Amino acid sequence: MQVRRHSRVFEVVVRGEIDYDESDLLGAAWDEADECDMPATVVDLTGLTFGDSQLLRSLLDARRRHQAGGRVFVLLGPLQESVTRLLTISGTLEHFTLTNSRAEAVRTTGGW
């Protein structure tokens, strides 16, 4: 996982698998996003191949924290089939702002 700070966007790039063992890394990223208080956070999930309920819990927590702070929270895809399935089966997909390209994420966040 990588964290990048742009002028207006905090970006979290997730690759590989996220399960219980890696969930603390996401929590630390959300803490850092809160601390830097940028207008938007984009979570690049294009390289995420697997996520379990810990990923889902973490994404929902980040979304809640961003909404409470008046900040934009965007998932960048396209998502792998397993990640789409997790969000769909849990009924949470429609609760996230999902973009399918970096250009669309830039438009959604108002620029990087």
Image: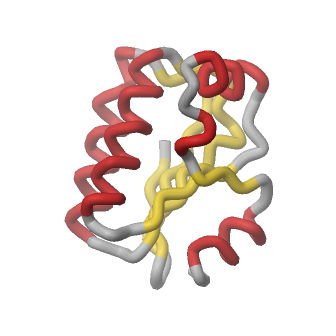
The residue depicted at 29 percent of the width and 30 percent of the height is: 24
Asked which quadrant contains residue 35, the reply is bottom left
The residue depicted at 61 percent of the width and 20 percent of the height is: 86
* Horizontal side, residue 35 vs residue 43: left or right: left
Q: In the image, residue 87 lies at what x, y percent?
A: 60, 27
* Horizontal side, residue 69 vs residue 60: left or right: left
Quarter occupied by the C terminus: bottom right
Q: Where 24 sits versus 14, above or below?
A: above
* Horizontal side, residue 87 vs residue 39: left or right: right
Give the total number of marks visible in the rendering. 0
Asked which quadrant contains residue 94, the reply is top right
Q: In the image, residue 56 lies at what x, y percent?
A: 46, 27
* Horizontal side, residue 6 vs residue 94: left or right: left
Asked which quadrant contains residue 91, the reply is top right
Q: Where 37 sits versus 112, above or below?
A: above
The residue depicted at 60 percent of the width and 53 percent of the height is: 97
The residue depicted at 55 percent of the width and 19 percent of the height is: 90
